């Protein structure tokens, strides 16, 4: 039976024509929402109305709370509609607006977050703002309706105060939007200082950095692995491994379905915010893969595979694109999809299996999260087996039959909402992770997923030499940003080093050249976040800090460095070095805010490993040589493959020039810092040249 017509239901607002699931969630609010665009801005100017700008994203729990409490309330909506032009923005679609107005709210309040609630002049300049506002006064937090009335009154009666405050805020925005640093010399000392800073913030008991809430900081973990590789320091490797293990055993990791939730609410990795973000799983699967390559610990391989298997199962569109997020909430409750009562475990597993399962995963009758249980492994698995009086293999057999049964039951619950738009930048992040894992783990299915994803992006989001930002339901839209070009080029380079299909190499170069043409700051160096022909905003953002995802400038520098070494183009490497030199002081003062850029600095200072292999891709001997390279943790390498007498590859990749097979066999050439070792045909000899054995262990 179809839904009954409700004459009291609000008429859809202008968001009904959008593709963003977040905007569509608000399309039936009684608020007269506009998407950001000329229509809303023109109305504000014509009627001299202030703009209420609300920015959030679909997996944001408090965004849902504020919608339910305020935006669905007719009286609150009436106030909004009477006094403001109301604009709703999906921060994942418009990172430029998010960056500009987040810097404003941080300047005003000393903190940021989502939902972001900003009040702007008709020219788009912020004069007041905050994040979440409750429906009634709560401690020091004023109610949203009181804020609306106060701001509207101020705009009407104190126009000069509003103007002066807007000018002050705009000045702060312009000062913080990409001011260049003093160029400084690049040295390994910067890396050593950064490591010392990271050690000071490290939680030696539970892993991770700082206290609650505790974020995964995957890029800092990548930096620690590089420190261990560069210096042989077992402490650096121990910090990375300890953190990765504790995260993966905690409630932040989905113990049944694989994949990581957003972050831990406490310092112990137990209760998370339950949303699953594509970018977290791209970066954390890659960090786990690199830990496996370094240590050969099968635990890290398992976490990598479970995470990527989860993405393949739940986050891939029929066309091959990667979806953005899964929500934290289902049936109006955060985490309800993922938690278990003790009674449910008994009913599904039976008393004996439930006893072992509960002991292993920390479940009890009282629960550990609002009366229910978040599955986690808080003790050493061997200690749990000993406490149960069962051999470890027997316990693992019990767990292996219990997990699929519980996952089957869980899949019958009401699922969290899915944000099924595909974002170019995030697809590039996940593309690289699948490409690297395909080679390192010998997983042909991962290779197919990576190739299919690249085909999807090339077919749907790359038109006439320009990228678009998002794709959903057959529609690609919005200008792409620096991060879209940089992250996709990075992913395509990883795909080239897996498949050696020159199409992906050429596309990566095209993206890099377009990135320089459209985004490079000719005056100060570095890249702007928006293209030169982008919509004019109150400021042109230039993000340098690595946050939940790496900054576009960080990834762009890494891409240009790798491309320069593959192509011999000094102009690429020079731009990468200029970014590093400009930010050297920032790296010294705030290293954990530049973790990915520290990895790029490590690349620029380390002896580069240029590996050329001459052989047919289908030749088992060629694959044996490639497997040595793929399996190892070689963060400073670039890799090229050419078939014998392949003139086209040589023209595009000088690294292959004058390379011949020895005695008709697949041959590897390794060069470090412009000095080449003898060519080899034996995989063991290649492993010796790359020094992949005998590394530091914890």
Image (tube, grey):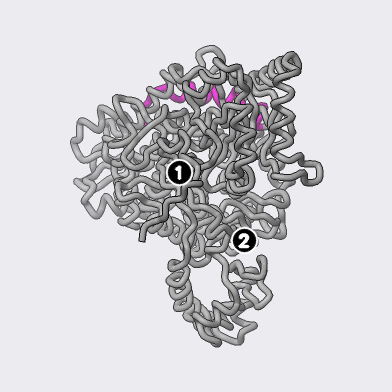
Report which quarter residue 269 is drawn in. bottom right
To which quarter of the image does residue 493 belong?
Answer: top left
Q: Residue at x 40, y 56 (%)?
A: 3
Q: Is residue 645 left or right of residue 405?
A: left
For residue 529, above or below residue 27: above
- Kindly state the secondary structure of the residue where label 1 is placed: helix
Residue behind mark 1: 21
Does 255 appear in magenta? no
Disc 1 versus disc 2: nearer the observer: 1
Q: Where residue 229 sits in the image (x, y, percent)? A: 55, 47
Q: Nearer the viewer, residue 307 or 26?
A: 26
Residue stretch in magenta: 566-587
User: Can residue 322 be seen in the rendering of this structure?
Assistant: yes
Q: Residue at x 21, y 31 (%)?
A: 648
Image quadrant where one finds the N terminus: bottom left
Q: Is residue 567 magenta?
A: yes
- Depth order, front residue of 228/595: 595
Label count reads: 2
**Percent of width and height locating residue 327:** 52, 52
- Marks 1/2 in contact by CB < 8 Å: the verdict is no
Disc assigned to residue 246: 2
- Tell me residue 532's x, y (percent): 45, 17
Is residue 619 found left or right of 307 in the rendered image? left
């Amino acid at each position: 039976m179809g839904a009954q017509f409700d004459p009291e239901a609000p008429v859809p607002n202008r968001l009904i024509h959008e593709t963003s699931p977040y905007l569509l969630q608000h399309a039936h609010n009684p608020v007269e929402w506009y998407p950001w665009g000329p229509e809303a801005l023109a109305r504000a100017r014509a009627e001299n109305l202030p703009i209420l700008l609300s920015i959030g994203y679909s997996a944001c729990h408090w965004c849902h709370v504020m919608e339910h409490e305020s935006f669905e309330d007719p009286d609150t909506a009436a106030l909004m509609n009477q006094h403001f032009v109301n604009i709703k923005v999906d921060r994942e679609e418009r990172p430029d607006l998010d960056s500009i107005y987040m810097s404003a709210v941080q300047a005003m309040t000393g903190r940021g977050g989502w939902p972001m609630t900003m009040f702007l002049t008709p020219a788009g300049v912020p004069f007041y703002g905050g994040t979440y506002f409750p429906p009634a006064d709560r401690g020091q937090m004023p109610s949203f309706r009181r804020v609306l009335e106060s701001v509207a009154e101020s705009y009407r009666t104190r126009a000069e105060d509003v103007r002066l405050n807007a000018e002050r805020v705009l000045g702060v925005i312009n000062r913080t939007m990409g001011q260049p640093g003093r160029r400084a010399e690049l040295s390994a000392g910067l890396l050593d200082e950064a490591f010392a800073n990271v050690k000071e913030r490290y939680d030696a008991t539970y892993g991770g950095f700082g206290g609650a809430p505790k974020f995964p900081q995957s890029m800092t973990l990548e930096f620690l692995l590089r420190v261990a590789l560069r210096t042989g320091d077992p402490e650096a490797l121990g910090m990375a491994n300890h953190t990765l293990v504790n995260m993966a055993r905690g409630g932040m990791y989905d113990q049944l379905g694989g994949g990581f939730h957003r972050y831990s609410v406490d310092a112990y990795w137990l209760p998370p915010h339950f949303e699953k973000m594509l970018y977290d799983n791209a970066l954390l699967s890659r960090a786990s893969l690199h830990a496996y390559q370094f240590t050969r610990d099968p635990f890290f391989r398992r976490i990598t595979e479970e995470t990527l298997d989860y993405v393949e199962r739940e986050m891939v569109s029929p066309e091959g694109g990667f979806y953005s997020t899964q929500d934290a909430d289902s049936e109006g409750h955060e985490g309800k999809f993922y938690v278990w009562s003790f009674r449910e475990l008994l009913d599904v597993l039976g008393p004996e299996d439930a006893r072992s399962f509960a002991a292993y995963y920390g479940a009890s009758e009282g629960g550990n999260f609002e009366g229910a249980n978040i599955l986690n492994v808080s003790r050493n698995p061997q200690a749990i087996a000993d406490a149960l009086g069962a051999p470890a293999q027997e316990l693992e057999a019990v767990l292996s039959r219990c997990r699929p049964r519980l996952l089957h039951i869980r899949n019958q619950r009401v699922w969290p909402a899915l944000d099924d738009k595909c974002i170019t930048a995030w697809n590039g992040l996940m593309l690289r992770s699948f490409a690297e894992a395909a080679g390192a783990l010998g997983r042909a299915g991962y290779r197919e997923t990576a190739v299919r994803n690249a085909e999807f992006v090339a077919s749907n989001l790359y038109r006439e030499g320009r990228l678009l930002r998002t794709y959903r339901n057959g529609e690609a839209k919005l200008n792409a940003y620096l991060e879209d070009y940089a992250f996709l080029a990075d992913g395509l380079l990883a795909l080239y080093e897996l498949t050696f299909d020159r199409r992906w190499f050429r596309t990566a170069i095209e993206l890099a050249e377009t990135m320089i043409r459209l985004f490079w700051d000719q005056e100060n160096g570095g890249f702007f976040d928006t293209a030169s022909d982008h919509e004019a905003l109150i400021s042109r953002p230039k993000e340098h800090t690595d946050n939940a995802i790496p900054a576009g400038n960080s990834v762009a520098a890494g891409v240009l460095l790798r491309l320069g070494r593959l192509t011999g183009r000094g102009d690429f490497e020079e731009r990468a070095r200029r970014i590093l030199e400009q930010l050297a002081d920032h790296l010294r003062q705030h290293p954990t805010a530049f973790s990915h850029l520290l990895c790029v600095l490590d690349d620029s200072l380390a002896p580069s490993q240029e590996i050329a292999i001459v052989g047919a891709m289908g030749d088992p001997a060629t694959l044996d040589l490639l497997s040595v390279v793929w399996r190892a943790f070689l963060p400073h390498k670039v890799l090229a493959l050419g078939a014998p007498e392949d003139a086209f590859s040589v023209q595009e990749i000088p690294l292959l020039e004058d390379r011949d097979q020895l005695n008709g066999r697949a041959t590897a050439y390794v060069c470090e810092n412009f000095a080449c070792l003898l060519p080899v045909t034996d995989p063991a000899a290649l492993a010796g040249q790359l020094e992949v054995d005998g590394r530091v262990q914890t």
